[in-house]
């Protein structure tokens, strides 16, 4: 009988057009909250399968194996503590009386349970199962109230509020309508199909066949993921016929260029989702524009088509923009010329605007715009954009000199790197800052390396983005990020929790990636101090360089964990890195190789023992240990003489490996010391009563510790 009560449940909320960028998120949250409530009330079990649907005008979901009525259950309710259940005369307290009355039980029916250190009264009440109908309306209502909607609206003369006016509600359990009212709308089994391609209302006879019914009778693809996949497939087919590639599919280089100004998500990564949230029955058509518009940099045209019109531009095999684009329409017609023609007419003025901005901007050189940056406030505590550019310029020159790059070119690129912020094109499309600076610098006759550095100084702008290429570009990119990070951090704007309005975590990771992955031999502490010294005295906190270094090392730990390195390996390397970030990856790879050797655990444990002994000796022997050297004639035990000789034998090899950056081989060489170290600890008393003997043995271990920890603190590997 229970199995017969299990049916698929459908809930659909029909609305006016929902916000496209939030559609998928809202639909998932809505379904998850209702389904969680069904599980909590025992109406859905582990065999239930949830399917979420989302279209521009509806949020819906189905859940299989939902019961028409709850099973009978024993509900356990916790009451007052036993100590508070009776007063000093042994009479039942008012609190306990109220608890018994609320649960319709007598004192004899109560049970006592231990919860931590206290004992409580508990009432176990047999609750008869209630029908689904008594719960569902409230579940749906509460789920809608919890949705992450920043702004609600009212409609008509009602007091109901939601993100958009509600037009219909379906609550169907199998073939049966679950009666209820949500946001002023009564439930039923009637919905609406495509606004133009369906006959209008659609009667749903069984919740299980919701998706099939909507597609066949309503010309609606209700599944968001299925609709998105359909669009991608049609885009592929249309592009293939034109021997082209649609941007967003196999066009990583363009994806790297077109990022949002906050550096988090590219236009391309969100456009397909947004278009899928705008149509119910997607059909792809091909449009085109006049070839003369291709004189404008293609990044400008691409953003114009994507952001303003939601079109998918096309590239040829060489990555050059074609004068054709793909339109995702919500209408399937036999003759689409009116749809295509209308879209072509709409896009033409947008492209004309882009061309106008481009031509106007080129009438003024970047250099002529630099002085005007003094009118743009960067931060009220850090001055104008011009003052910021001056700091970046000075720092770029310093870094370029350290990297043997052209100092004058680096300073020129830095001086011009923010000038395109004052152009019309970047004003319209902030995502193109740097990109347009590159184009305008070339137009002004600047050297290609300078123009490239202007564009590259924003890189990397998001996780996985490309790095600046070459010492000149790296100089400007590092200077820009260091100036921002040190300056903003130094005035107390430290990221907290999820809040990082200035993107300091992103800037820190960008600096780390440039230093590590390029790699560049630029010690991090010196870079941070130089950046801090460029600010006027008293502007930043006195400890900003050290504070930012600690902040960056935390980011470095996360970066290395994401690359798959173990925490113990990371800590071993960071302990001995001393700001030489360019050595991070080869050193940690060496540690990983060493950790795979059979002898590594014993050597790590021995190294930890050496460190502990040395710590105690430094505490007890004090200044005697600072300049202590091994005196071979005082090595009286055979085991300590053998260890000393073994150390002398491998030191040249270990040092040569270290000098060549072969860190794994350096650590591997330590394996030959294992038997000598074992014998030493088994046969030699380090903490000898004779002070001179003790100092000499401590000096031997001190030298051993230095030899063993040239690459990393391998004691961190000890379990």
Image: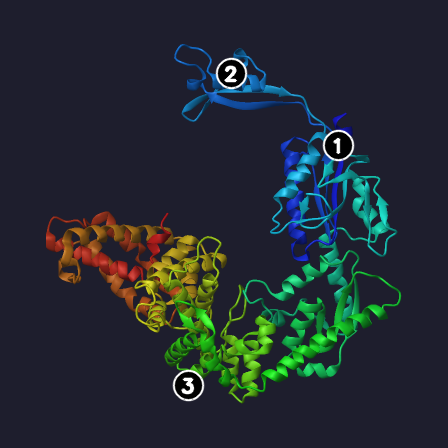
Residue wearing tag 3: 408
Of callouts 2 and 3, the N-terminal one: 2
Q: Is residue 644 left or right of residue 26?
A: left
Q: Is residue 680 left or right of residue 423?
A: left
Residue found farthest to the front: 157
Helix, strand or loop at label 2? It is: helix
- Residue 612, relative to residue 141: is it above or below? below
Percent x, y of residue 632: 16, 62
- Residue 710, relative to residue 165: is it above or below? below
Residue wearing tag 2: 97
Q: Nearer the viewer, residue 713 or 11?
A: 11
Percent x, y of residue 19: 68, 55
Residue wearing tag 1: 6
Residue at the image point whose x is 82% and y is 68% from the top: 339
Alpha carbons under labels 3 and 1: distance apart = 77 Å
Residue at the image point whose x is 39% and y is 67% from the top: 381
Q: Can the viewer see residue 19 in this picture?
A: yes
Nearer mark to the viewer, of 3 and 1: 3
Q: Quadrant of residue 43?
A: top right
Residue at the image point whose x is 71% and y is 72% from the top: 313
């Amino acid at each position: 009988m229970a199995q017969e009560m299990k049916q698929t449940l459908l809930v659909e909320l029909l609305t006016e057009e929902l916000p496209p960028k939030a559609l998928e998120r809202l639909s998932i949250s809505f379904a998850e909250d209702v389904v969680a409530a069904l599980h909590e009330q025992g109406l859905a079990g582990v065999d239930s399968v949830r399917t979420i649907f989302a279209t521009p005008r509806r949020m819906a979901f189905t859940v299989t194996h939902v019961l028409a009525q709850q099973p009978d259950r024993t509900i356990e309710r916790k009451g007052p503590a036993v100590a508070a259940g009776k007063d000093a005369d042994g009479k039942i307290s008012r609190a306990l009386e109220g608890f018994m009355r609320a649960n319709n039980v007598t004192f004899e029916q109560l049970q006592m349970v231990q919860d931590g250190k206290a004992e409580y009264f508990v009432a176990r009440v047999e609750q008869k199962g209630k029908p689904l109908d008594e719960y569902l309306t409230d579940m749906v209502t509460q789920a809608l109230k919890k949705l992450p909607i920043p702004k609600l609206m009212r409609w008509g003369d009602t007091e109901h509020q939601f993100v958009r006016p509600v037009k219909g509600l379906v609550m169907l359990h199998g073939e049966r309508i679950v009666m209820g009212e949500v946001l002023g709308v009564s439930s039923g089994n009637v919905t609406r199909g495509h606004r133009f391609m369906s006959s209008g209302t659609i009667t749903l006879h069984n919740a299980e066949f919701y998706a099939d019914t909507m597609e066949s009778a309503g010309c609606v693809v209700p599944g968001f993921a299925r609709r998105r996949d359909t669009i991608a497939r049609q885009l592929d087919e249309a592009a293939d016929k034109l021997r082209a590639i649609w941007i967003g599919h196999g066009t990583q280089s363009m994806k790297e260029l077109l990022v949002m100004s906050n550096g988090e998500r590219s236009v391309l990564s969100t456009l397909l989702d947004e278009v899928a949230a705008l149509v119910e029955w997607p059909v792809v058509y091909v449009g085109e524009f006049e070839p003369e518009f291709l004189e404008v940099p293609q990044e400008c045209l691409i953003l114009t088509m994507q952001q303003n019109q939601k079109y998918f531009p096309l590239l040829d095999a060489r990555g050059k923009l074609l004068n054709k684009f793909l339109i995702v329409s919500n209408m399937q017609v036999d003759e689409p010329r009116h749809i295509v023609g209308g879209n072509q007419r709409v896009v033409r003025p947008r492209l004309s605007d882009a061309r106008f901005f481009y031509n106007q901007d080129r009438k003024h050189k970047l250099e002529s715009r630099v002085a005007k940056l003094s009118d743009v406030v960067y931060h009220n505590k850090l001055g104008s954009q011009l003052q910021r550019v001056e700091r970046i310029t000075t720092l770029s020159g310093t870094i370029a000199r350290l990297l043997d790059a052209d100092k004058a070119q680096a300073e020129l690129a830095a001086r011009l790197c923010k000038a395109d912020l004052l152009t019309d094109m970047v004003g319209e499309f902030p995502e193109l800052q740097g990109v347009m600076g590159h184009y305008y610098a070339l137009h002004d006759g600047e050297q290609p390396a300078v123009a490239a550095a202007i564009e590259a100084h924003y890189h990397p702008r998001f996780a996985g983005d490309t790095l600046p290429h070459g010492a000149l570009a790296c100089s400007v990119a590092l200077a820009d990020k260091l100036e921002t990070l040190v300056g903003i951090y130094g005035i107390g704007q430290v990221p907290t929790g999820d809040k990082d309005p200035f993107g300091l975590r992103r800037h820190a990771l960008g600096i780390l990636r440039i230093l590590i992955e390029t790699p560049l031999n630029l010690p991090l502490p010196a870079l941070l101090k130089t950046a801090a010294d460029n600010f006027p005295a008293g502007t930043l906190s006195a400890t900003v360089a050290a504070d930012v270094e600690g902040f960056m090392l935390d980011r470095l730990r996360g970066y290395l964990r994401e690359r798959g390195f173990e925490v113990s390996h990371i800590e071993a390397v960071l302990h001995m890195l001393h700001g030489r970030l360019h050595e991070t990856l080869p050193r940690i790879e060496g540690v990983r190789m060493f950790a795979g050797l059979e002898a590594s655990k014993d050597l790590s444990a021995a190294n930890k023992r050496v460190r502990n002994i040395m710590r105690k000796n430094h505490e007890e022997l004090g200044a005697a240990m600072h300049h202590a050297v091994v005196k071979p004639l005082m090595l009286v035990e055979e085991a300590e003489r053998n260890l000393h000789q073994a150390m002398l034998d491998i030191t040249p090899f270990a040092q040569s490996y270290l000098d060549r950056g072969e860190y794994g081989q350096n650590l591997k060489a330590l394996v030959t010391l294992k038997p000598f170290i074992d014998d030493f600890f088994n046969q030699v008393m380090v903490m000898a009563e004779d002070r001179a003997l003790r100092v000499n043995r401590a000096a031997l271990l001190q030298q051993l510790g230095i030899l063993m920890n040239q690459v990393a603190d391998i004691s961190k590997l000890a379990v």
